[in-house]
Amino acid sequence: MHTRRVTITNQTGLHARPAAAIVSLAGQFSSEITLSKLDAAGEVVTSAPAKSVIFVLSMALTRGTMVEISAEGDDERTAVDALAGLIASGFEEG
């Protein structure tokens, strides 16, 4: 299993378009990928499969929220790094 933490940086948080981008990118990998919302102490508040837009949206991820991406499978490292890069980019929302 490979994990990485990243902070939601885009102004509007994870609304429909960024959530769809996460799900689309996650769907390109064979690994099982989980997105977890962390509290200020770094503890998991809630988790969801990164390949489900409904579950990702239900996490209500706002700007400044720390998330942990974890994956298990043949392409786990590539999957986690790609998703972390997407989130860190702010979904190119300026």
Image (cartoon, rainbow, N blue to C red):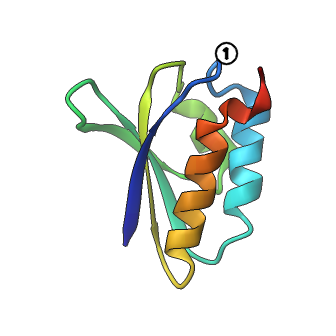
Q: Residue at 67%, 60% (x, y): give it.
A: 26
Looking at the picture, tell me which residue is in the foreground, 68 or 92. Answer: 92
Residue 18 screen position, x and y as percent: 73, 35
Looking at the picture, tell me which residue is in the foreground, 91 or 20. Answer: 91
Q: Residue at 55%, 59% (x, y): give it.
A: 81
Question: Which quadrant holds the N terminus?
Answer: bottom left
Inspect the image, locate mark 1, and give the three-letter code of the amino acid beneath it: Thr
Residue 52 screen position, x and y as percent: 65, 51
Question: Which quadrant holds the C terminus?
Answer: top right
Residue 36 screen position, x and y as percent: 41, 44
Q: Residue at 48%, 56% (x, y): give it.
A: 34
Q: From this view, report whether residue 10 is shown above or below residue 19.
A: above
**Residue marked by disc 1:** 12
Q: How busy is the neighbourhood of tag 1: few (under 14 within 10 Å), some, or many (20 plus)?
A: few
Image side of residue 91 versus residue 8, left or right = right
Image side of residue 14 versus residue 93, left or right = left
Looking at the picture, tell me which residue is in the foreground, 8 or 14. Answer: 8
Q: How many marks?
A: 1
Q: In the picture, residue 78 is in which quadrant?
A: bottom right
Q: Secondary structure at mark 1?
A: loop
Q: Residue at 70%, 25% (x, y): give it.
A: 15
Q: In the picture, residue 38 is in which quadrant?
A: top left
Q: In the picture, residue 46 is in which quadrant?
A: top left
Q: Residue furthest top?
A: 11
Q: From this view, report whether residue 67 is shown above or below residue 8.
A: below
